[in-house]
Amino acid sequence: MTKNQIIYKVLKSNLIISIVILIIGFFYRSYEVINCSSQYIINYQETVAIKIINFGLFLIIIFPVLRIFLEFCFFIKEKNYTYIIICLLLFSVIGISIIS
């Protein structure tokens, strides 16, 4: 398998998993809205459905980081030091933006 095929399969599976999780969260949220009273939903914002939806969104947001990590692994295997440094710089930028 080539590098691009591996990256394609990993990113595609991540996308499918995140879409399935989002769909489950939306259906569960619809179930909560239909079966629970409105006062309960207003007072209890962090329902299980919202947590499921947030996790699905988190998986979608993590796509670029996953892609950089996979490229980083391949660059280490190929001993391409220029791109290893670029990947490390990208990780540091992402880390700084998360912290601040």
Image (cartoon, grey):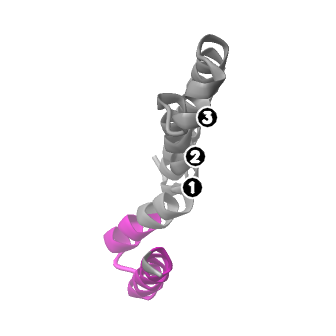
User: Nearer the observer, disc 2 or disc 3?
Assistant: 3
Residue 22 falls in which quadrant of the image? top right
Residue 99 location (% of width, % of height):
42, 78
Residue 64 inside the magenta-drawn segment: no
Q: Residues within 10 Å of mark 3 (few under 14, many from 20)?
A: few
Residue at 32%, 68% in the rendered image: 77
Disc 3 on helix, strand or loop?
helix
Residue toward you, 96 or 62? 96
Residue 80 location (% of width, % of height):
40, 81
Residue 30 location (% of width, % of height):
66, 20
Residue at 40%, 70% in the rendered image: 72
- The span from disc 1 to disc 3 (Cα, nearest Å) is 27 Å
Report how many numbered discs are placed on residues in the image.
Answer: 3
- The span from disc 2 to disc 3 (Cα, nearest Å) is 22 Å
* 20 w.r.t. 79: above or below: above
Three-letter amino acid code of the residue under disc 1: Ile
Q: Which residue is mark 1?
A: 61
Q: Main secondary structure of the magenta part?
A: helix
Question: Looking at the rendered structure, which numbered label has been put on residue 57?
Answer: 2
Residue 31 falls in which quadrant of the image? top right
Question: Looking at the rendered structure, which numbered label has been put on residue 26?
Answer: none
User: Nearer the observer, disc 1 or disc 3?
Assistant: 3
**Magenta segment boundaries in residue numbering:** 71-98
Instruction: State yes or no: discs 1 and 3 in contact (Cβ < 8 Å).
Output: no
* 62 w.r.t. 27: above or below: below
Residue 33 location (% of width, % of height):
65, 20
Instruction: State yes or no: discs 1 and 2 in contact (Cβ < 8 Å).
Output: yes
Question: Looking at the rendered structure, which numbered label has been put on residue 42?
Answer: 3
- The span from disc 1 to disc 2 (Cα, nearest Å) is 6 Å
